[in-house]
Amino acid sequence: MRKIIGYCFLWLLLPCCNQLWAQNQASNDILAQKLVDELLAKHQAELLYLGLHLVPPNGTESAIVAATLRDKIGKKSSCADLHVLETEVPILEMKGGGGTVIKGTIIGSTVLAPLHDRKGNIVGIVNIGMSFGTGRESEAAKFARSIEQELAGEIAMKLALFERAH
């Protein structure tokens, strides 16, 4: 009987433990991830994906350090991503031309652009996946620019992105 009561007690506590674990995970996020999560929540209708590519402190290669799809974190930046850093020119890809892919289906557009801090220094790359499809290039470009500006306004300097978020 005690075992049954004990198991019932544990079963009732499990949802609370899961919630506390999730809160703890979120509190361990770096500032870059916090910014990504906040922007996704704020622009949920238009923003499908957001990823920040940076060279980590003491690192030598650019990688995804924060993303709405957390399984992408840690993956190295591609040649196309790095081309944006070299040229400092954003790239807009529309549906039908390599836009945002979710579960194997192209559903929107993607912008790869230099990521700036408040002072205008380039600190990395931002990958913005949006719901805007073909024929809405102007809207996609304006929206991407607004996301870039929101991010830049929150970044005091590159190293701050790697600090624990409060």
Image: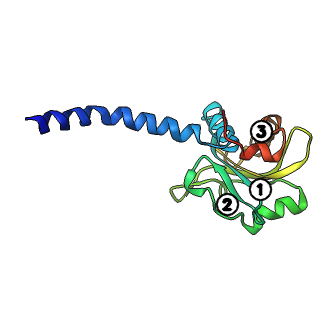
Name the colouring of the figure.
Answer: rainbow
Three-letter amino acid code of the residue under disc 3: Leu
Measured from the top left, where is residue 122 in percent x and y? 87, 50
Residue at image mark 2: 98
Instruction: Say which quadrant the N terminus sits in.
Output: top left
Q: Nearer the viewer, residue 29 or 147?
A: 29
Mark 2 to mark 3 CA distance (whole Å): 24 Å
Q: Which mark is residue 6?
A: none
Residue shown at the point (83%, 51%) measured from the top left: 123
Measured from the top left, where is residue 28 in percent x and y? 59, 42
Q: Residues within 10 Å of mark 3 (few under 14, many from 20)?
A: some
Three-letter amino acid code of the residue under disc 1: Pro
Residue shown at the point (51%, 38%) measured from the top left: 24
Q: Residues within 10 Å of mark 2 (few under 14, many from 20)?
A: some
Residue shown at the point (45%, 39%) measured from the top left: 21
Mark 2 to mark 1 CA distance (whole Å): 31 Å
Q: Which mark is residue 57?
A: 1
Q: Secondary structure at mark 2?
A: loop
Residue at image mark 3: 151
Q: Secondary structure at mark 3?
A: helix
Instruction: Say whether disc 2 or disc 3 marks the residue closer to the N-terminus.
Output: 2
Instruction: Say whether disc 2 or disc 1 marks the residue closer to the N-terminus.
Output: 1
